[in-house]
Amino acid sequence: MRYTRAQINGLIKITEATFAAEQARMIRLSEREADLRGTLAEMRRALHTRAVDPTQDAAIRAGADLKWEAWVDHRIAALNIELAKVLMEKQNVRSALKQAFGKYQVAEHFAQDARKARIKAADARDERGY
């Protein structure tokens, strides 16, 4: 079956757009992952700082800091759950990204083959003199 240039170009545009969309999803997820990891590191650092030098804060000396520590522990747990969800979604997007890239590559090769066939046909016409 022969396809027109417009059909082939349309196929390339669709597969390229799909690939770009999957790339954008992966970038957004990677940025979210980095944000979550940064927030978790800050919270752990804050807990560690208070644990290392408990004399630096009057609230700690007074024992009023237990609610803050409980909140931080709860928040770290929630952030870890969210991070796990992001990592799982990244894995799904990675699969979709691979598939989209493969389809884009096939469309590009299809277009190259069609170009070569058109050139070959044109050369054959030239040789025959039409």
Image (cartoon, rainbow, N blue to C red):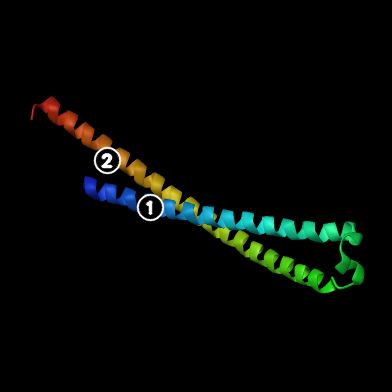
Circle 1 SS class: helix
Is 52 situated left or right of 117 in this image? Answer: right
Circle 2 SS class: helix
Q: Residue at x 73, y 57 (%)?
A: 42
Toward which corner of the image does residue 52 lie, by quadrant? bottom right
Is 90 situated left or right of 61 in this image? Answer: left
Q: Amino acid at mark 2?
A: Ala
| Residue in the foreground of this view, choosing between 49 and 125 | 49
Toward which corner of the image does residue 50 lie, by quadrant? bottom right
In the displayed structure, would residue 67 be above or below residue 57? Answer: below
The residue where tag 1 is placed is 17
Q: Residue at x 86, y 63 (%)?
A: 57
The residue where tag 2 is placed is 114
Q: Residue at x 14, y 25 (%)?
A: 127
Q: Residue at x 17, y 32 (%)?
A: 122
Q: Position of residue 20 (x, y in %)?
A: 43, 51
Q: Position of residue 11 (x, y in %)?
A: 31, 51
Counting other residues with Cα less than 10 Å from the Cα at mark 2, is it few (<14), some (14-19), or many (20 or more)? Answer: some
Q: Which mark is residue 89?
A: none
Q: Amino acid at mark 1?
A: Ala
Q: How many marks?
A: 2
Asked if disc 2 and disc 1 are in contact, CB closer than 8 Å, the reply is: no
